Amino acid sequence: MTTDAFTYVGGELELFEEAENWKNYWASEVMPFIGPRVAEIGAGIGTNTQLLNRKAERWTCVEPDQAMARRLKWRSRANELGPNCEIVNGWVVDLPRKPEYDTALYIDVLEHIPTDRLELSEAARRVVPGGYIVVLSPAHQWLYSPFDAAIGHVRRYARDTLGACRPDDFKLVSMKYLDSVGVMASLANRCFLRSAEPTPKQIQFWDKKLVPVSRALDKLTGHRLGKSILAVWQKR
């Protein structure tokens, strides 16, 4: 796939940009695995970069959409994306094919990529021994909705399907579901509303009312259920 072949479908990033409780929740789970040199694949408009890039020695935003990459460059020049940020308009294969990153991040990105196993194998080549690949994606194929289709999701993941993407020479550190209460909201949309796009009011209700409950309930249930799944693998 080439850079020119990809154009962002639109909708997903803008809708969830203000979901502060959700962002802070998953970020608290991801931050322990953020090393000094990070490759963020599918950086979008830089919302996650701004959230996670606090003290990196080198943070590389990889974004295939040309318009978004230009926006990232503008935001980087305006010092909005944290320290030592560089922008690559392309894919993971456009990075040097050698181990030089401590963390490869896929935040709500892998589900858009048809060749997910190949994608992570390419990322694995660029991670140093002891480094991490971190993936956050929507969970449960039975929750796949018109909204997923509208924003270009190829699939949703379960433990087995995401686990099958583990690159060689990597060991599983953690795999857990997040947002158990959100499953019910997603199921309601799939079964009853069948909306191609939730409204901003629905997003705010979920973020302000449901996510805080999920954050507490997920611990009690041992992260066995959730509308998102988080996997962390470490290179041997």
Image (spheres, helix red, strand yellow):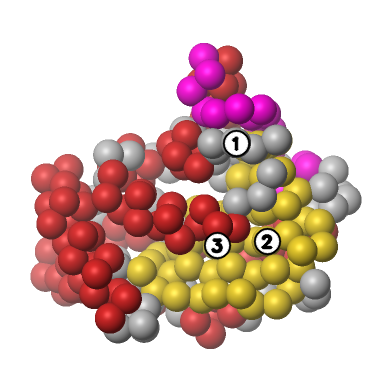
Q: Which residue is mark 3?
A: 135
Question: Separation of disc 1 and disc 3 at Cα?
Answer: 21 Å
Assign the magenta stretch its main secondary structure. Answer: loop
* Residue type at tag 1: Lys
Q: Secondary structure at mark 3?
A: strand
Query: Residue 132, image x and y in percent?
Result: 68, 61
Q: Residues within 10 Å of mark 3 (few under 14, many from 20)?
A: many
* Residue type at tag 2: Tyr
Q: Secondary structure at mark 2?
A: strand
Q: Residue at x 55, y 57 (%)?
A: 32
Rendering quarter of residue 26:
bottom left
Farthest residue, direction right: 98
Q: Which residue is mark 2?
A: 132
Q: Earlier in the sequence, mark 1 or mark 3?
A: 1
Above or below: residue 55 compared with residue 28: above
Q: Is residue 14 left or right of residue 188?
A: right
Name the mark nearer the viewer: 2 or 1: 1
Query: Residue 1, image x and y in percent?
Result: 70, 48
Q: Secondary structure at mark 1?
A: loop
Question: Separation of disc 2 and disc 1 at Cα?
Answer: 17 Å
Q: Which residue is mark 1?
A: 55
* Residue type at tag 3: Val
Quarter of the picture containing the C terminus is bottom right
Q: Residue at x 12, y 52 (%)?
A: 205
Above or below: residue 153 compared with residue 8: below
Residue extent of the magenta highlight: 78-95
Q: Is residue 194 left or right of residue 73?
A: left
